[in-house]
Image: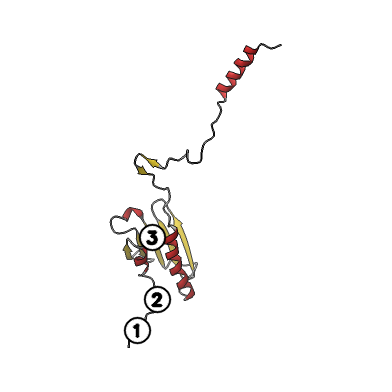
Amino acid sequence: MTDSSEFDADRETVRQLHPAKKPRSPTAEVPQTFGHRPIVPAVVSFNRHELREIMNLYGRMVAAGEWRDYAIDFMADKAVFSIFRRTSEMPLYRIEKDPKLANKQGAYSVLTPTGLILKRGQELGRVLAAIDKRLKVVPG
């Protein structure tokens, strides 16, 4: 028969070589705050309400035959919604969200293909009005 003390010694050796892994919760890996400040997400993106406003404008312009395609880019420092007249061209407009500029000139801006800023501001609706070509009633 085998001595039980030898068996216990072997078991202890295995535990030292292969420690048991504790199950982790999904939030245990990434802390949500660092001190008192929340952690900035790794990628800037448009939220649901911002996308709704942009897609409402895009839908109207596609229905009018002005625009045909779009692209969305999420980067570390900004999010960009590019609008194309044709797929193979440069974007007709770029709608950018840059949170670093939120307290200065406004997080949202509309740019032309040459980089000219048409409008910049704090509210997306007002910024999008620069490229929204709604029909207007002319008095007369």
The x, y position of residue 53, in whole percent, is 42, 65
Q: Quadrant of the N terminus?
A: top right
Q: Residue furthest bottom?
A: 140
Q: Secondary structure at mark 3?
A: strand
Image spot of residue 72 (x, y percent): 46, 60
Q: Could you give the CA–CA distance between mark 1 and mark 2, rounded to whole angstroms?
A: 12 Å
- Find disc 1 in the rendering and name its residue: 138
Residue type of the residue flagged with mark 1: Val
- Crowding at mark 2 (Cα within 10 Å: few <14, some 14-19, many 20+): few
Residue where numbered disc 2 is placed: 134
| Disc 1 secondary structure class | loop
Q: Image quarter for residue 54?
A: bottom left
Can residue 90 be seen here? The reply is no
Amino acid type, callout 2: Arg
The residue located at (48%, 72%) in the rendering is 62
How far separated are the C-alphas under marks 1 and 3? Answer: 32 Å
Q: Is residue 101 above or below residue 18?
A: below
Q: Position of residue 77 (x, y in %)?
A: 38, 52
Q: Residue furthest left?
A: 104
- Tell me the mark number nearer the camera, choosing from 1 and 3: 1
Q: Disc 2 to disc 3, how far (Cα)?
A: 22 Å
Residue named by callout 3: 96
